[in-house]
Image: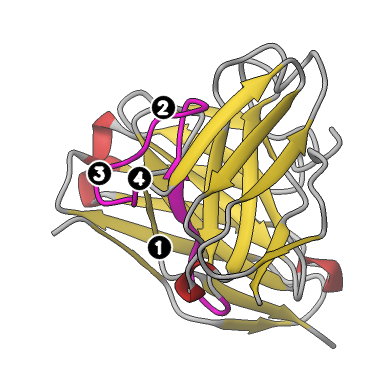
Amino acid sequence: EVQLVQSGAEVKKPGESLKISCKGSGYSFTSYWIGWVRQMPEKGLEWMGIIYPGDSDTRYSPSFQGQVTISADKSISTAYLQWSSLKASDTAMYYCAFGPKLSYFDYWGQGTLVTVSS
Amino acid sequence: QSALTQPASVSGSPGQSITISCTGTSSDVGRYNLVSWYQQDPGKAPKLMIYEVSKRPSGVSNRFSGSKSGNTASLTISGLQAEDEADYYCCSNAGSNFVVFGGGTKVTVL
């Protein structure tokens, strides 16, 4: 069974760092693009960026370039999204998803809720 | 990069057909045949309904169809059913390196 399992909900303070994960199984992790999508409370979907674990080719939306880092460890079929200094405006649900091309996602993780509050 | 423009809401009665528009520019929707559509139920992860303008993934009902003309893509749901009530998002390449979503459309079945 194809699955993307994301790490659990996080509550952090502004200025703290964070790394959330997304573990793939049931498919060839290195042969598909895996990306991250943000959904702020009661808002729409925002494409953040994507990585091809086979060669670590990484692309970012201009809106998120420099704000987050996307990485992957193909030895454990896991992708990551990290922040070095969180802001309250980073409070959102974050979904990982993968697909055969950069342009669309076949399968989605269950989401990780990140809450940033002092 | 601006989000693609979708109507905030569309409604229809059971059995009717509805169409959701997704308007971009010549740099995204108009340039690439890489428009996709996602359905999202409240509190759930999105689900791919259409990719590459008009292709349907395995398991998606043929009541869902996609098309594109110029800078505007469309998702049509025919034979509207109660279970189709959800938020729908379009998505398009906006360059060779990234993708942009539309603002989302809430579909209500009357």
| Residue with the mark numbered 1 | A109
Seen in the image, is B72 located left or right of residue A4? right
Range shown magenta: B42-62
Query: Residue tagged by mark 2?
Result: A101
Q: What secondary structure is marked by label 2?
A: loop
Residue hosting label 3: B58
- Percent coordinates x, y for residue A100 in the rendering: 34, 30
* Mark 2 vs mark 3, CA separation in Å: 17 Å
Can residue B34 be found in the magenta stretch?
no
Distance between mark 4 and mark 3 Cα atoms: 10 Å
Residue at 46% across, 39% down:
B50
Residue B56 falls in image quadrant: top left
Report, in whole angstroms, how far the alpha carbon at label 2 lies from the one at label 1.
17 Å
Q: Where is A55 relative to B38, above or below? A: above
The spot of residue B10 in percent (x, y) is 74, 60
How far apart are the two marked residues, 3 and 1, measured between alpha carbons? 19 Å
Residues marked 4 and 3 touching at CB (< 8 Å): no
- Secondary structure under tag 4 reads loop
* Element marked by disc 3: loop
- Residue B86 in picture, x, y percent from top left: 58, 69
| Disc 1, SS | loop
Magenta segment includes B47: yes
User: Mostly what secondary structure, the magenta segment?
Assistant: loop
- Which residue matches tag 4? B62
Q: 10 Å neighbourhood of mark 1: few (<14), some, or many (≥20)? A: many
Instruction: Tell me: B82 left or right of A41.
Output: left
Q: Residues within 10 Å of mark 2 (few under 14, many from 20)?
A: some
